[in-house]
Amino acid sequence: MAGCLWRLVQLVFGLALLSIAWVAAYRVVDPPLTFLLARDRLQGIPVRREVVPLSAIAPSLPRAVIAAEDSRFCSHRGFDVEAIEAAMEANREGRRLRGASTISQQVAKNAFLWPGRTWVRKGLEAWFTFWLELLWPKARVMEVYLNLAEWGRGVHGAEAAAQRYFGTSAARLSPRQSARLAAILPSPIRRDAASPGRYTARYARTIERRMRVVQSDGLDSCLSR
């Protein structure tokens, strides 16, 4: 019995070390495959993806996703405690369920895991989030996020999204175009950045206003180039 327990401990410890090494490797190596990419390819969907460095993406796009997805991105260490508490309070009161995932948590999910809401998956997400925040600079977290994000069926990453919706490169995105791309992130299959519906257009205008606050308050200062 003791021998089996010791082997189990060794296995768990070995897997933990392997996962940390995996996170460390992705600090310098771009994730070659994700669950979403594999899903599209298995379904025969043509995939558009071109990995580009953060320096080749207009500053307005990370500013827009910070405004839309994670306003405390530069100040938290992977987990937005205030957002988690607000989400728990809203859920307790029976209001519409809301999430509290940070950009870092979304990177952990997209780069290392699979979609889902099980406790096991959420636990692994927390584990990978902790290590990527410890081992990566914030700029790398944002870079990987923008290169992995799904922006439509078969459209993965900022460069593919810019070309698909606006016929331009990610480096040449305008603030308005960036706001529209951020506005479709919650539902990239149903929403269109080039021809947004009324709700998406209104949400994009809200993001554009928030982007000015992000810039003026230095909420994207951790991405300084």
Image: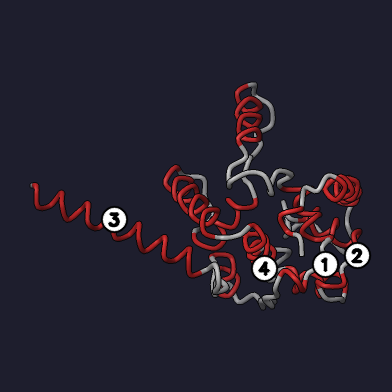
Is residue 73 placed above or below 108 in the rendered structure?
Answer: above
Q: Residue at x 80, y 55 (%)?
A: 63
Of marks 3 and 1, which one's residue comes earlier in the chain?
3
Q: Residue at x 15, y 52 (%)?
A: 6
Sort mark 2 into few (<14), some (14-19) or many (20+) by Cα contacts within 10 Å.
Answer: some
Quickly name the residue at label 3: 13
Q: Position of residue 198 (x, y in %)?
A: 91, 49
Q: Is residue 63 visible?
A: yes
Callout 4, which amino acid? Asn
Quickly name the residue at label 2: 174
Quickly name the residue at label 1: 58
Q: Nearer the viewer, mark 1 or mark 4?
A: 1
83 displayed left or right of 113: right
Of marks 3 and 2, which one's residue comes earlier in the chain?
3
Dot 4 falls on a residue whose secondary structure is: helix
149 displayed left or right of 62: left
Number of marks drawn: 4
Label 1 – label 2 distance at C-alpha: 8 Å
Q: Nearer the viewer, mark 3 or mark 2?
A: 3
Of marks 4 and 2, which one's residue comes earlier in the chain?
4
Label 3 – label 2 distance at C-alpha: 47 Å
Q: Residue at x 58, y 46 (%)?
A: 77
Dot 3 falls on a residue whose secondary structure is: helix
Sort mark 4 into few (<14), some (14-19) or many (20+) by Cα contacts within 10 Å.
Answer: many
Q: Could you say which disc has been placed on residue 147 in the image?
A: 4
Label 4 – label 2 distance at C-alpha: 18 Å
Q: Nearer the viewer, mark 4 or mark 3?
A: 3
> Of all residues shown, which one is farthest toward the top?
93
Q: Nearer the viewer, mark 1 or mark 2?
A: 1
Dot 1 falls on a residue whose secondary structure is: loop
Label 4 – label 3 distance at C-alpha: 31 Å
Circle 3/circle 2 CB separation < 8 Å:
no
